[in-house]
Image (spheres, rainbow, N blue to C red):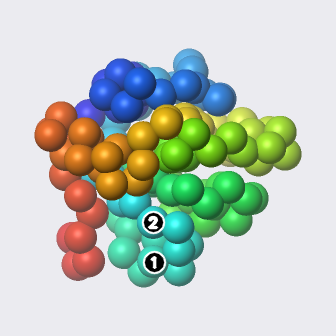
Amino acid sequence: MKLLEVKRLLDAEVLCGEELLDAEVDSAFGSDLMSDVLAFVNTRVLLLTGLVNPQVVRTAEMMDISAIVFVRGKQPGEEIIELAKSKNMVLLTTENTLYTASGKLYLGGLTGEEKGE
């Protein structure tokens, strides 16, 4: 699924990386625990989280995640946005909860990331 479709499905605002919205993601993973992200995530994954701190971007970088959606209307600070820009990441924010955002993406055809995949 293209990130442009993710933006549309979640009625999300682009915080950075608008020029990268043609990129594809194969699955999504929602978590506020970055240790779970490190344990379960493979490549071309969209990360959904309510956690707003630099560790989210650092963890995404380690796992080659190129797009993050902040749920519940969370707005990262400028430091986080600048860090994501420097890593060529897309940051989105949506008013949807993690559960609702995940459901909308699933209904739209994006599968979840499962352990061992």
- The x and y percentages for residue 63 are 51, 64
Tell me if mark 1 has few (under 14), some (14-19) or many (20+) residues whose alpha carbon lies within 10 angstroms of its own: few
Q: Nearer the viewer, residue 63 or 74?
A: 74
SS class, disc 2: loop
SS class, disc 1: helix
- Residue mark closest to the camera, 2 vs 1: 2
Residue extending farthest to the right is 79
The residue at 61%/65% (across/down) is 59
Ranked by sequence position, the earlier of labels 2 and 1 is 2
In the rendered image, is residue 58 in sight? no
Q: Is 86 placed left or right of 25 in the picture?
A: right
- The x and y percentages for residue 71 are 50, 46
The residue at 62%/44% (across/down) is 74
* Residue indicated by mark 2: 31
In the rendered image, is residue 32 in sight? yes
- The x and y percentages for residue 91 are 59, 38
Q: Is 86 placed left or right of 15 in the picture?
A: right
Tell me if mark 2 has few (under 14), some (14-19) or many (20+) residues whose alpha carbon lies within 10 angstroms of its own: some
Position of the N terminus by quadrant: top left
- The x and y percentages for residue 14 are 57, 26
Q: Are marks 2 and 1 in contact (CB under 8 Å)?
A: yes
The residue at 36%/59% (across/down) is 29
Position of the C terminus by quadrant: bottom left
- Marks 2/1: CA distance? 7 Å
Circle number at residue 36 = 1
The residue at 53%/74% (across/down) is 33
